[in-house]
Structures are given as C-alpha cells and as structure tokens.
Image (cartoon, rainbow, N blue to C red):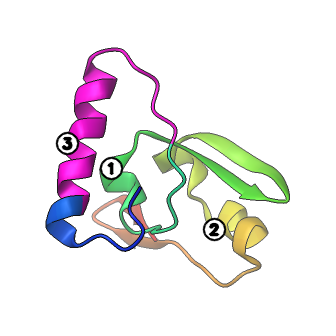
Amino acid sequence: PFQGVDAPTERAIIEVLDDLADAGKTIIVVHHDLQTIPEYFDAVLLLNVRAIDSGPVEEVFTEENLRLTFGGRVGVLAASGAGEV
C-alpha cells in the first residue's frame, strides 16, 4: 500500500493499520523499504523464492538472513544495541 505515496500519506496508512491491529485484526503487508520495517511492523517474513525466516523483526533481520534474501547486497548496522538495515 506504500508504492508511490508521500511521507504523510504513508504515516496515515500506518495509523489505519495500527488501528486495525489494535482491534485484533491480522495485517499482512508486502513492504520493500527495509529501513522502515522495524519501525512499522512487529514481525517479518523474508522471501527469496522460498521462505528464508520469519518472526520478530529484531530476530529475523540478521546479516545471514539478509544475505540469503538479497544475495549479500544488504548488511545490518548496529546502533545503540539495536539492529538497523
């Protein structure tokens, strides 16, 4: 739902998704901006033809999983004890 939208619209979409999640709804989103995934989502599924890993973002976003997903083109930077892509 984020393709081609500006930042204020993206934030509005996230607010709607958060409201739905708070109401007990399951939310499934295809999202390609790795930098915002930890901010927007609690869990992630990494795919590259097959499922690489799934679970809490902080556990799934590892250098190995990102290498398997993106062919070594992405790394994890440590900042303040938290993983950043």
Asked which quadrant contains residue 71, the reply is: bottom right
Viewed as shown, does residue 66 lie left or right of 48?
A: left
Whether the residues at callouts 2 and 3 have beta carbons within 8 Å, the answer is no
Q: How many angstroms separate mark 1 from mark 3 (CA)?
A: 10 Å
* Image x and y of residue 17, in percent: 30, 37
Asked which quadrant contains residue 22, the reply is: top left
Query: Could you classify mark 1 by the number of other residues whose Cα lies within 10 Å: few (under 14), some (14-19), or many (20 or more)?
Result: few
Residue 63, disc: 2
- Residue receiving disc 3: 15
User: Of callouts 1 and 3, which one flags the residue occurring earlier in the amino acid sequence?
Assistant: 3
Q: Residue at x 71, y 74 (%)?
A: 70
User: Of callouts 2 and 3, which one flags the residue occurring earlier in the amino acid sequence?
Assistant: 3
User: Of callouts 2 and 1, which one flags the residue occurring earlier in the amino acid sequence?
Assistant: 1
Residue 11 part of the magenta-drawn span: yes
| Magenta stretch, residue numbers | 10-28
Whether the residues at callouts 2 and 1 have beta carbons within 8 Å, the answer is no
Which mark is in front, 2 or 3? 3
In the rendered image, the vertical position of residue 43 relative to residue 70, given as above or below: above
Q: How many angstroms separate mark 2 from mark 1 (CA)?
A: 20 Å
Q: Amino acid at mark 3?
A: Glu
Query: Could you classify mark 2 by the number of other residues whose Cα lies within 10 Å: few (under 14), some (14-19), or many (20 or more)?
Result: some
Circle 1 — which element?
A: helix
* Image x and y of residue 24, in percent: 35, 14
**Residue situated furthest right in the rendering:** 49
- Residue receiving disc 1: 40
Q: Amino acid at mark 2?
A: Glu
Q: Residue at x 20, y 70 (%)?
A: 7
Circle 3 — which element?
A: helix
Viewed as shown, does residue 21 lie left or right of 68?
A: left
Nearer the observer, 55 or 11: 11
